[in-house]
Amino acid sequence: MAEKAKNVTQMHRARQGEITPQMLRVAERDGIDAELVRDEVAAGRMVVPANVNHAALDPIGIGKAASIKINANFGNSAVASDIDGELEKLHLAVHHGADTCMDLSTGGDINGIRQAIVDASTVPIGTVPIYQVIAELEDGRDWTAEDLLGMIEHQARQGVDYMTVHAGILSKHLPLVNKRITGIVSRGGSLMAQWQLEHGRENPLYERFDELLDIAAAYDVTLSLGDGLRPGCLADASDAAQFAELDTLGELTKRAWQRDVQVMVEGPGHVPFDQIAMNVERQQEVCDGAPFYVLGPLVTDIAPGYDHITSAIGATAAGAAGASYLCYVTPREHLGLPNAEDVKQGVIAYKIAAHAADVARGFPGARERDDALSRARFGFDWNEQFALSLDPETAKEMHDETLPDGYFKTAEFCSMCGPKFCSMHVTREIQRNTGLGEIPLEAKQ
Amino acid sequence: MAEKAKNVTQMHRARQGEITPQMLRVAERDGIDAELVRDEVAAGRMVVPANVNHAALDPIGIGKAASIKINANFGNSAVASDIDGELEKLHLAVHHGADTCMDLSTGGDINGIRQAIVDASTVPIGTVPIYQVIAELEDGRDWTAEDLLGMIEHQARQGVDYMTVHAGILSKHLPLVNKRITGIVSRGGSLMAQWQLEHGRENPLYERFDELLDIAAAYDVTLSLGDGLRPGCLADASDAAQFAELDTLGELTKRAWQRDVQVMVEGPGHVPFDQIAMNVERQQEVCDGAPFYVLGPLVTDIAPGYDHITSAIGATAAGAAGASYLCYVTPREHLGLPNAEDVKQGVIAYKIAAHAADVARGFPGARERDDALSRARFGFDWNEQFALSLDPETAKEMHDETLPDGYFKTAEFCSMCGPKFCSMHVTREIQRNTGLGEIPLEAKQ
């Protein structure tokens, strides 16, 4: 176990008044002041996940003063996928704009896969350590507190930047889920609850939270306080179980901050659109402004196969209301392990959500790219439109399907309307005919 | 021209105290009271687009007292598509859940295509009559007020249920677009503005609005007051041009209601997420609660190829805030004429938006389908999950790609997590182990 005395976290250094190279980089990437980054990290309102053993890392900041970040999950399961597939998903996710990735592998050579991912990745890598504990057992209930803490330290040593720990799901919360339609839908949460009930013991991560903080402080692992009781359907949203656990997460947030450990708080899940802002505001209040890391939320349960869309709607609303970090959901959520195309679709949907939310909350400079693309659109500079778009290849392919010739890359129309019905072409024609580049103040007589 | 004396509109009959067969059917479909439908239609807060010449129609209601409806646009352009393709798009759109369809054809045998679509369609069909006027001319500026009014009556006779008319774009509004990035982006709006400027005349549909009302009253064409100056990018949203035209649309709404003509009001377009509710509230106030028919809005301009998603986000927010009718946007918006797959993707995205908004605003019974699907999910009844989902084939295909065998249709896991890590499987195991079907109040000692 790590020594208690040693503390290498960004929060510790921020509180000492230091602007670290990581904070400088975060400031540079988001176009914000380095002093602001330090102040926010010191206050706990921003995290910079940066394990001291993650050599390839190019750090990012997560918090309200930064741009909204998105996370892509992947990892194999016992049922499907292999190491090459996972590395391809990492590459694809980062290529399309994922700010962080979680390796959720639960089968095969887990240590090898994780080390390969950490070594290859410039973005922060997260894990859920309980998965590996259980993957390595015959019976998923047959583990001890020492096994879990040992696994957390093992993964910290590997260079994992942030870890989901389900430390807030207490035995007294569990009966609160009995009224639910979908029970416990967090994987880690259900495994932890099962252990608590089978062994008749309190949550070991809660009871031994100080030891967890020792490890986090020694490697600078950012703790992501998992919401093991998050709702798994609209009917279960904002219920007593969810908010009871949130209160515990608020308590753990303060305990982490007392030890200068970086912490963020995870949130739902499935939430009706009208309850999203309330959920964000409640988390911000209960957890004193610790960054909120939401999984969607999905705003309806009826669209399996399209949950990147149902959840991007919720994620936009959450980001606009103050969530700082959006965990993507792929089209294959609830149906199977995502493949490479699913990962891409999930990332793009969440780039949209994060960006739209940044525009909505007035993050400085966020709208510049929209305006630049709109100028290119009005100027019929098709190549510039493609270049400025989130997925240039797809935009170009869709355009070129009907008008492939190079000539059409500067044409004042596309196949949607044709030249006679292109509104922007007509507007430009009006402007040209007046000779002023403007619509005249008085109509021609 | 139609006789002034004759008025066959649903609004006229509602105001006479009649509950028409159309109103009864609207009430039945939405599970609301027929008296309520009549009251809302009489007050103008609901429209039932139902041209007396549309024999195959199965009517729907659009308004805050009804469930939110979605519209799919298609139609050929001079550049691409044919009649069989358009009928296939109609079929696909209705199959996936479009409540209405607009035929926006601008090339080929327009009359033949439209008549085929009206004859085949059980859903209300809409058009933008100015398109056909201009499609049939060499020079798109060379038409008269009589041409346009004649075309409107011709299409009314064909059985078109609702028509977009750009009657609110006045000459005094036009200089207000000079500060914009993307000028005028409504096709009809730009064509009307061009005519006004070239001929030095006021908008003929505004000047001769009473004649338009005569036609609408004679066939019961619901007027959809087009927002010719809607913003085409985030930067242009909520500007002086948009709101000046909205004020005119409010004035025209009241004039239509004086003649018992059904009317709805069209809205943007491209709007930052934080301005959407304000836009809906403003329309509802200016137009005295006339149904708001929004095109998205898109919440970012940077994702061509994915504008079904950028706009479904905005459409959900608009619906939750009080918009009654959502015009879909396909992935190919801004890039080309949508093909059949694009139509499907657009419709599904908007079914999601409309449903999520109905849940958010507490429309009676809206959440029942979510709850039923969630129960099937927790019960691992995969076939029932597929059946209850918006796109059963896609959901089943995604699931079956890794676990095709019939055995897995009742298995307590999917390939996403596998059996050991399925949270709902673990929850059910906990329930089974207690013998109570519940998580016990006290943990095992």
Image (cartoon, coloured by chain):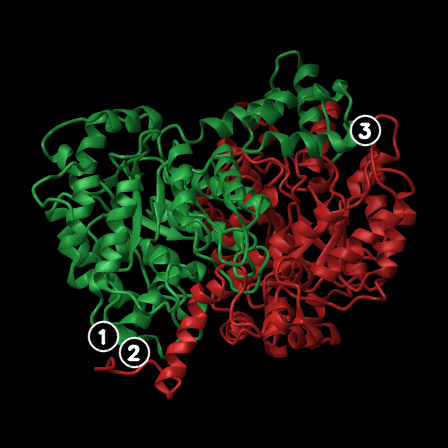
Chain colours: A green, B red
- Amino acid type indicated by mark 1: Lys
* Label 2 chain ID: A
Residue B123 horizontal/vertical position (percent): 76, 62
- Amino acid type indicated by mark 2: Pro
Task: Say if residue B247 shows up in the picture.
Answer: no
* Label 3 chain ID: B
Evaluate whether label 2 is on the same chain as label 1.
Answer: yes
Mark 2, residues whose alpha carbon is within 10 Å: few (<14), some, or many (≥20)?
some
Kindly identify which residue carries mark 1.
A172
Q: Are marks 2 and 1 in contact (CB under 8 Å)?
A: yes
Kindly identify which residue carries mark 3.
B140
As helix, strand or loop, the secondary structure at mark 3 comes to: loop
Kindly identify which residue carries mark 2.
A175
**Residue at coordinates 14% horizontally, 33% vertically from top-left?**
A13
**Residue at coordinates 78% horizontally, 66% vertically from top-left?**
B8
Residue A154 horizontal/vertical position (percent): 27, 47
As helix, strand or loop, the secondary structure at mark 1 comes to: helix
Tell me how far mark 2 sits from mark 1, CA to CA: 7 Å
Which of the labelled discs sits on residue B333, or is there none? none
Is A43 located above or below residue A135 in the figure? above
Circle count: 3
Mark 1, residues whose alpha carbon is within 10 Å: few (<14), some, or many (≥20)?
some
**Residue at coordinates 37% horizontally, 88% vertically from top-left?**
B436
- Amino acid type indicated by mark 3: Gly
Q: Are marks 1 and 3 in contact (CB under 8 Å)?
A: no
Q: Describe residue B362's horizontal placement relative to residue B210 as left or right.
A: left
- Residue B99 occupies which quadrant of the picture? bottom right
